[in-house]
Image: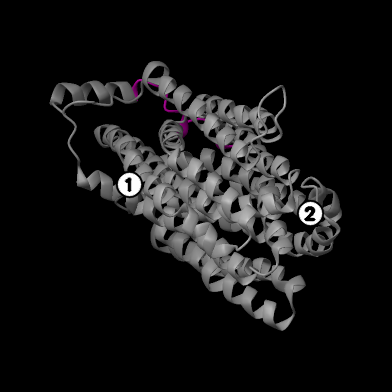
Amino acid sequence: MDDNEKTYNDKRLTSKPNKMGTKPVGRLLASMSGPAIFSMLVNALYNIVDSVFVSMISQDALTAVTLAFPIQMLLISLAVGTGVGTNSLISRRMGAQRFDEANKAAEHSLRIAFLNWGVFLIFGVFFAHRYMDAYSDVPFIVENGTIFLQIVTIGSLFAMIAITIEKTLQATGNMFLPMICSLSGAVTNIVLNPILVLGLFGAPALGVKGAAIATISGQILNMVLGLIVFFKVDKTFSIRIRGFKVDWNIVKDIYAVGLPSIIMQSISSVMLLGFNAIIVHYKTAIAVLGAYFRLQSFVFMPVFGLNQGAMPLMGYNYGARNKERLIKVFKIAFIAAFVYMTLGFAVFQLIPEKLLMIFSASDEMIEIGIPALKMVSICFIPASFGIIASTFFQATGHGSISLITSLIRQICGILPLAWILMHWKGIMYIWMSFPLAEILGTAYISVMLVRLYKREIKNLSQVEIK
């Protein structure tokens, strides 16, 4: 990039009012998080709708989609983790007035999205059937799970690009337009699911395959709208098609935060793979696990939406060395997350049977599911602190701490505890592994937050931001 182009980009990036460093924190966080929270609520519905209609076919159909779910999570983890790294880098560089590097981060992130897609393209073509065959010997489950996986992995390019654009725009404080793009894709999926799964309005009844096609259709629309916003409406960044050269320092900076985030989110997939293996002989328990992970998205996804507003605010004020605003964002975000997740806990405790009936639950699924939802939901309250603290570490360039926390919770915590409880108390008590592991993770991240504050945040103005 020559000096004239660099100057042009610097002027463009500084031409907008610098609201992240000036406006009142509470109202700014609400305005930036509000669209993302709404978008995440719709996406929670987006996540649950395929399972709801698939469950109308049979419990085996729900089990097939549930077994495919960890791979979907890995796919999204790679896209979101890369986006988180890009978001954190752009917001920190803008706060530090290093605008050329912010623009380079945006340029690199779009190229990386294509490379990420290649990983799942290979999986879908060569390994989808082998994966399903390893978890079930029921022909219906294996066949339908394989079809579902092949469609969502081979077509994952659309999700990769859409998420990259969303995170890049959010880093500049633009929360509304990414929300509209995501919302449009989610609504498309919600509308198409019953039509394609059940064969409404003269469409063929495609079953599990229809759920996958509906998912990809929503992602295509999300991507197309995102590209229009990015290149034609927002125009914050200048993306070169020709003359682009890889800057490995930018890639390194993106993945300094992005890689821990990818691993951190992928750990959930690994945990699910392990948990499914522990309960592999209990098809109904697998269906309950699938129902829980769809339902809990209504509790966790809005808090992740809150994070989308909080992360660029934290990152910007960390880059600008504004300790007071940085801490204030953290406190307000935590209070909001705590209140919301406490309400979610109350719902899971009071009406678990009604929640399970959304999935046309059988009597056996109800019997296992009611105590399961009550036990697992205990983790919601401590998780509110863990999520916001993890966002704080990511926004300040310390994503490895969030990674270790996730390892403690889900690999060192949930899986060993689940195995012990399964063999000691049986399938009905295995669900207590979730809240017990959450307590371990909360203890660790609390200690690390205190250490970070004493070493770096307390004297932020004297610290060199990297």
Residue 280 is a magenta residue: no
Q: Classify 310 as above or below 14.
A: below
* Quadrant in the picture for residue 116: top left
The range drawn in magenta is 14-26
Question: Outermost residue, left direction?
Answer: 2
Q: 115 or 18, which lies in front?
A: 115
Residue 47 place in picture, x, y as percent: 63, 42
Q: 311 or 48, which lies in front?
A: 48
**Apparent side of residue 147 relative to residue 358 in the rendered image (left or right):** left
**Residue to which mark 1 is pinned:** 254
Question: Outermost residue, top direction?
Answer: 232
Residue drawn 58% across and 76% down? 416
Q: Please tell me whether mark 2 sits on a helix, a strand or a loop.
A: helix
**Apparent side of residue 16 relative to residue 288 in the rendered image (left or right):** left
Q: Classify 433 as above or below 346.
A: below
Residue 296 visible in the picture = no
